Amino acid sequence: MSSMTNMGDGRKVSKSRQSSSSDEEAKTGGEGHLKKGPWTSIEDAILVDYVTKHGEGNWNAVQRNSGLARCGKSCRLRWANHLRPDLKKGAFTEEEERRIIELHAKMGNKWARMAAELPGRTDNEIKNYWNTRIKRMQRSGLPIYPPDICFRVMHGNQESQNVGRLTDGVNQHDDLSQTDTLNIPELDFKHVKIPLDPSIFDIPENSMFEQSSDSSHGYNMFPIMHPAKRLRESAEIMQYGPVYEEDYMSDEITNQFHGNTCCSSSSSMPLSGGMKLELPSLQYLETQQGIWDTPASPLPSLESVDTLSSGLLEPIMYQPMKHFQVQETPDEAVKCKPEWDESGEPYSPLAQSSASVLTMCSPDGPQSVENSDHNIKHELGTEFPTYCSGKDEKNMNQIHVTRPDALLDLAWFENSVVNCDGESFRKDALNTFFG
DNA sequence: AAATAGTGCAACCGCACTCCC
DNA sequence: GGGGAGTGCGGTTGCACTATT
C-alpha cells in the first residue's frame, strides 16, 4: 500500500534512520524492544495486513499478534495518518485550506474535529498545516484569519452550531453547569488595571495603573506577526474602536481605560517571546472577564473551559456582544446582535472578532478604518486572492466596532454608559468592577 | 562547494477520557 | 466505585530537505 513512507516522506525513511532499520527489525525482537522512529515499508505492510484481516482497534493486539515491534499507539497513529485507504494524499487543495481556516476560526485547535470535517485528512496533517501556516503568516505579517473567512464563519454560524452540536455536544450542553463550576482564579488586583481615576482610592496612579508584569495576558490576545511591530499603544488601537465610545466616555476615562485595559495589549511591553498563535487572546480573560462584567449577571452559556483552552475566541466574545447590543440602535443591534438558537445558545461574533483582532495586528498597525481595511484586502490579495469580495466591504467596516478589546471595553461599561457623568459614572464603574 | 538557517512533516509523548472487569 | 487497558487528542520534538549566504 502506498503511504507517506513511499511518497512525500520517503526522504526521511530512505535516510539514515530508516536504512539502519533492517527488515528483521520490523519484527519484534521481544516485548521490551518496541521500535521507534520512522516506519519501514515492511512494517507498513505488516500493519496493513493485520488491519485488513482484523479491522481497526485493539491496537495493542497488533504488536502481540503480528509481531510488529511497535506499540499499539504507534500502530494506530501510523494507520490513521498514513495507511488508511481513505486518506487523501498530497497537498491541501485551496478549498481544503479555506475550510481549515474556517474550521479553525470556529473550533480552535480541535484538530480531530477539524479532520472529521475534512474527509481523507488527518488531524496531524491539519495541525501541521496550521502550524506551518501560522508561521508563514507570521513571517508575512498577514492576518491569520482572512476577514471573509471570519464573516463566513459568522454568517454560517447556524451551520457551525450544528457542527458543534454534533461533534461536541458535551461542550455545547454542559455550558451552564460548567459555568457554575468554572474555577475562577483568585484575582490578583496588583495585576488589574483599573480604568478609573486613581484618586478615587487615593492610590498613586503609577501603582494603580502599573503595567502588569504578566503582560502575556495582554498581548496573548493578538496573534503576533511581527513582534516588534505588532501592536502600538493600546490607546492608539482603541482609537479605532467602537464609534460609540466617544459618545459615552469622557476623554479622561477613555484614555485611561484604553490605555490600561487589562484586555488590551500592553502599550509598552515588547511583543516578543514565545506565544501560541491561535488566537489565544482572551483565554486568560475568560476569567478576568468576570472583573469587567457584573458578577451578578448570569454568564452566557460559554463554551467549555476546554474550548477556551483551545484558543478559540468565540466563547468569550459573545458576551461582550450581548452587552454591546444594548447600546445599539435597533438597526445596528440587529447587525451585531448575538443570535440565539432554539436552545438558547448565542451565535458567536467570533468572525468579526477575529477579523478585528487581526486587523489590529497587521504589520502596519491601524492607520484608519479605511486604511486598515485596505491594507488587509491588499495583503490578502496576495495570500487569499479569492477571499475578499466587494460585498464584504460593508461588513468589514463592522470589524472595527467589534474588536474584542472594544467589546470588553463595552462590556465593562455596560452599566456605565447610562450614567457617564462624573461621580455616578465612577460609582457605577466601581460597582461593576468590584461587584 | 560548503556551511548555515529555515522549513515541513512524521512520529513521539503525556494527558485525559471511555470502557470494561 | 476503583483500577487497568485501550484509545483519542493536542503539543512538541527531531530530522530530512531546501534555500540562502
Image (cartoon, coloured by chain):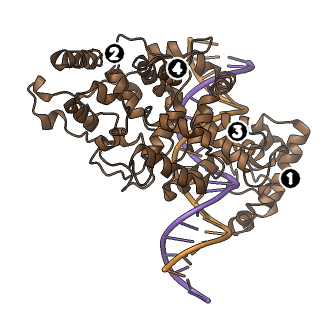
Chain colours: A brown, B purple, C orange
Q: Which mark is residue A115?
A: 3
Callouts 1 and 4 in the same chain: yes
Q: Is residue A3 above or below residue A358?
A: below
Residue with the mark numbered 1: A45
Looking at the rendered image, the disc whose residue lies closer to the viewer, 1 or 2, is 2
Residue A144 in view (yes/no): yes
Residue with the mark numbered 2: A294
Indicate the position of residue A203 as horizontal and vertical percent values: 10, 29
Q: Residue at x 32, y 29 (%)?
A: A245
- Mark 1 or mark 2: which comes first in sequence? 1
Residue type at numbered disc 2? Thr
Looking at the rendered image, the disc whose residue lies closer to the viewer, 1 or 4, is 4
The residues bearing labels 1 and 3 have C-alpha atoms spaced at a distance of: 25 Å
- Mark 3 or mark 2: which comes first in sequence? 3
Looking at the rendered image, the disc whose residue lies closer to the viewer, 1 or 3, is 3
Chain letter for mark 3? A
- The reply to whether discs 1 and 2 touch (Cβ–Cβ < 8 Å) is no
- Mark 3 or mark 4: which comes first in sequence? 3
Residue A288 in view (yes/no): no
Residue type at numbered disc 1? Ala
Looking at the rendered image, the disc whose residue lies closer to the viewer, 2 or 4, is 4
Q: Which mark is residue A13?
A: none
Residue with the mark numbered 4: A334
- The reply to whether discs 3 and 2 touch (Cβ–Cβ < 8 Å) is no
Mark 3 surroundings: few (<14), some (14-19) or many (≥20) residues within 10 A: some
